[in-house]
Structures are given as C-alpha cells and as structure tokens.
Image: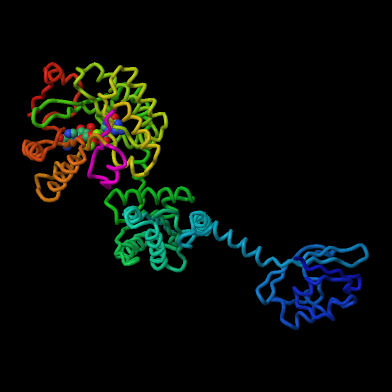
Amino acid sequence: THGLCMFDSHRRLIICNDHYAKMYKLPAELTTPGTALSAILQYLIGKGTFVETSEETLNGTDTFAANGNGKLVKAIQDGRLIAISHQCTADGGWVAIHEDITERQKAEAHITHLARYDHLTDIPNRVFFRDELEKTFQQLHNGKKFAVLCLDLDRFKGVNDTLGHSIGDKLLNAVAKRLANCVKEHDFVARFGGDEFAIIQANLDRPEDGGKLAERIIERISTTYEIENQQIDIGVSIGVAIAPTDGTNVDQLLKNADLAMYRAKEDGRGAYRFFEPEMDARIQARRALELELRSALVAGQLQLYYQPLVNPRSGEVRCFEALLRWFHPRLGEIPPSEFIPLAEESGLIGSLGEWVLRSACADAAKWPKQFRVAINLSPIQFRNLNLVKIVFSSLAASGLAASRLEIEITESLLLEDDSKTIAMLHEFHSLGIRIVMDDFGTGFSSLNYLRSFPFDKIKIDKSFIHDMAKGGDAVTIVKAIVDLARNLKIDVVAEGVETAEQLEYLISEGCTEVQGHYFSAAKPIECFEKVFAQPNGRIEMAA
Ligand code: C2E
Ligand code: MG
Ligand code: MG
C-alpha cells in the first residue's frame, strides 16, 4: 500500500513502484528511470495537487533535516493526507516512502472526538469540560470573573422509567440543544453523563449575571417537550459557583457548584442557588456526624425501641417493630430519618444493621412465644451476599424461631430488579421468615413488585392514613390497597394510626393489623411488660 521511489545524487528517478505513480496520478513518461524530480514536482504543482506549495516543495527539499532524512505530511487538494519519509543512501541519493494516511488520521480524529465529546448528545463531555475549565482559570485576568453552573434535571428518571430509554435519549438531546441556545458564544456547555450538565459562563462582569443565565435556563428547560407524540415536562436544578471567589482551582469550583446544586434540589427543585460557604460547613458537619455514628455503637448510644402491631378489632399485639434510636450526648435524640441515610452512604449500615438484627432477635427470644419481631432492612444491606448468613446466625445465636421474624423492606430494593435480591428473599422465606413490603404507596407502587415476590404483608404508608381525614384520594388509595391485599391473600397493615376515626375506617375496610401512636409510640421494651403479662397480649390505648 506504500508508494516507493528512489532517486540518485543528481535528483533523477532510479525506480518507483506502481503505487507511487497511482498515488499522484503520474503519466507513464514521468515514471521512467532518469526523470528529474523537478519535472515530476512541476507537473504536480501545475495540476494544483498540493494544498500548499512553497519554494521547498519545488526544490523537493521541503522541511527535511539538513542530512536529508526525516518525515513530513503533505495535504493533497482532493482531501488526502500523504506521509512521506526520506532516507538518504550512501551514494548521495535517497529512498522515499509515501503513505496515504487519510483513513488512519480520520480514525485517530474520531477517537480523539469520542474521548472529548458525549456520545449521545455530541456536546463536550466531562474530560473536555475540565480541560476547558483549567484553561479558563489560566486566562483569568485581574478583576475578571467567570461562573460554573452545575445542572441536574428534575424528574428525568421518571421519564426514562415510564416512557423508555429511547425517548429518554431524545429528551437529553433536546435539552442539550436548548442549553446551547441559552448561552453566549464564549460560554461552554458539557454533559457530565446521566441527566447532569455543566456550563462555563465566561467573562462575567457581575456575579448576578450567573443567576440571570440560570433563570433563562430554568425557563427554557421546563417548557414542554414534544417527543414521539408525547408531551413531556421536566425541570432543572442549578448550582452556581463564581471563580475566583468560590474556588481557585477546577476541583474546588466544581465541588462548590455541585453543593449549590444539591441545595437547589433540597429547596424544592426547579430553582438555582449560588454557592455559600455555609453549604460547605453543612457537609463538614455531616461528615463529623458520620464519624460519630461510627463510635456510637461502641459507646452504647444506640438503642432499639419497639412499637406494637395490633389486631384492630381485639387490641391484641402480634408483633413488635424494632426501631433504632440514637441518643447523642451533645445533640440529643437524632431521628433515624437523619442517621440511617448517613449510615447507608458511609457503608456503616452493614455493622449497624447486623447489630439491630442480633439485638432484636435476642430480645424477642425472651418474649412469650406468640409475639413476633419485625426488623427493617436497608437495600444497601442486600448488597452484602453474606446477609442470609447473618440473618441465619442471628436466629441460631438467639434461639428465636424463624417464624417469629418479619423482615421489612421497601420498594426501592426491588427497583434494580436484581435476581440475587429475589433469591435472598426466597431463602428467608423458605426458612419461615415473613417478608413485609413497608411504606407501600410512596415509591413507584408498581404492581409488578408485588408479583416479583410472594409478600406476606404490605404496610400502607402512614402518609395515606394521615391524609384520610381530608377525604378524597387518600381514602380511595387505602381502600384500593386493602382490597388488593385481600384478593392477593396478603396481610395488610396500616401504619401511623393516630385517631379513633382512622381506626374505625380501617376496621370497616378490613385492615388486618394497625400500628401507630393511637396504641403506642415506639418505646423501650420494658414499657410493654403489661402486654407480656396479659394472657392474650392485649394493649390499652395510649390515650
Ligand atoms: P418505618 O419502618 O416505616 O417505621 C415507621 C415509622 O413511623 C417510625 O419512625 C415510627 O416511629 C413512625 N410512626 C409510627 N406510628 C406513628 C404515628 O402514629 N404517627 C407518626 N407520625 N409516626 C408514627 P422512626 O422510628 O422515626 O423510623 C423512621 C424510619 O427509619 C423507619 O420507617 C425505617 O425506615 C427507618 N429505620 C428505623 N430503624 C431502622 C433500622 O433498624 N434499620 C433500618 N434499615 N431502618 C430503620
Ligand atoms: Mg418499617
Ligand atoms: Mg413504614
């Protein structure tokens, strides 16, 4: 595939191959031995072959080193690129190899493009963005500012899950186009992956201008999209960090814009927030709390409280749900809604969850045999393939019968549709452990989840019980869940029962179990000695 030619010290052709002639479309008379190089070059230049022709081209010396050896690449008018390598011979002539590298160059350019552009939207990716940000920092002159905006779409996951990935992809493309239309010429838009985008807003005169751009983007992005005849509405949350005030290097500035974005999400989405040093402080405080949680277990600051699950007609207690409490020496009682997510993020949930399992089983083993214990397991705990062993060994160590253990999981566990998770649930089931779907109605409430595993019980989330008093939706939903459970022959519990009216309605609908402050809040197990002492385990109402 290479064109080869050899010249003598008088710059006359000794020999060339067919490929050389074809490459330059040389007529036969210019390929005969003895042809002067200058004749060949004059012919080619006359035909306008080269994109650039200089004195050196004509001389055939081009930019090779003084000794005549070396390589160069020539661009040909028809779009080809030819790499020429020169090697001098002992008698003062030279051999030249001409190689058409057009395709190779294209492939290389393609690879470079792939490495720096997002494959879906074809706008710059994170790598390119960081390089550009680095450059922007270097060009930052005295008194000048620029902004970085971190964007995260709201409700994108819902679109992807319900309408499918192909529509999700088209939506992301549409978003990328709208973003490009929002910014000025010198600004830089990139996709970081998923539903995350980022923008460098160059040459800010005043920091407020970062907010103006964010406002414009929020308005544009939340205008309805029409994709494949579907009307789609999403939103966007934006964090803005200004350089150099909020960061003097790439990592710091990006981190702070990200923190501001999370704050925008927390504050209700569809908004933008400027970075404030206080946000960083909050993250630091979280990290400190995470560290303290690590030692809380050893320090005995964690305790299990129990809340009874009651037969609504007879008032008999059947089961106690173990609910974790953290008594912090300085901050007082920290609710599980705060520290469980922290434990999940830090991986601490593994040892914490194991402690809960072992303690709850050990406690329950001491109760009269008609009482079961319910334990909440986090989805993160299911990532540990040893979970089954941990549960079995907790039962074995405590001597608690498997039929007295209930495991509560939430829908989010089944979101990932992991066959390993389902297999674990089946293993628990085969031992006689009951599996409960907690907080039903709050997640995706897909009926598919109820089909993916034969649940023993579903727990209607307390938000519905709470809203029943308002009438409307909540009542309909509660009724529908109770009916559904009855038809599927699954037990149904209502959690968060606080009033006699709620209880009455739930009884009339046929709810088989209730839990809530109406009977008792979660308390230390000693508080239920009276229940244990009663032959039928009945509980008095809390009020
Ligand atoms: P959950 O499993 O849905 O627990 C029910 C929550 O509702 C408990 O909150 C309980 O105290 C509260 N509750 C019960 N009755 C009433 C009522 O009548 N009114 C109101 N307003 N609330 C009521 P708690 O103890 O704060 O726990 C919150 C969540 O933290 C639990 O929700 C559970 O998801 C999680 N959690 C608690 N302990 C553990 C644990 O040991 N492991 C894991 N993985 N998660 C836990
Ligand atoms: Mg629960
Ligand atoms: Mg619940």
Q: Is residue 352 above or below residue 439?
A: above
Q: Which residues are magenta?
A: 433-454
Which residue sits furthest right?
A: 91
For the point 78% across and 77% down, the residue is 55
Q: Is residue 184 left or right of residue 264?
A: right
Q: Nearer the viewer, residue 139 or 279?
A: 279
Q: Residue 518: x and y, percent?
A: 11, 32
Q: Nearer the viewer, residue 218 or 426?
A: 426
* Residue 435 among magenta residues: yes
Q: Residue 232: x and y, percent?
A: 30, 62
Q: Nearer the viewer, residue 37 or 180?
A: 37
For the point 34% across and 66% down, the residue is 228
For the point 27% across and 50% down, the residue is 267
For the point 21% across and 18% down, the residue is 367
Q: Quadrant of ligand 3?
A: top left
Q: Is residue 536 left or right of residue 454?
A: left
Any part of residue 359 in sight: yes
On-image quarter of the N terminus: bottom right
Q: How many marks?
A: 0
Q: Is residue 29 above or below residue 63?
A: below
Specify the color scheme: rainbow
Q: Is residue 284 left or right of residue 497?
A: right
Q: Nearer the viewer, residue 246 or 263?
A: 263
* Residue 130 among magenta residues: no
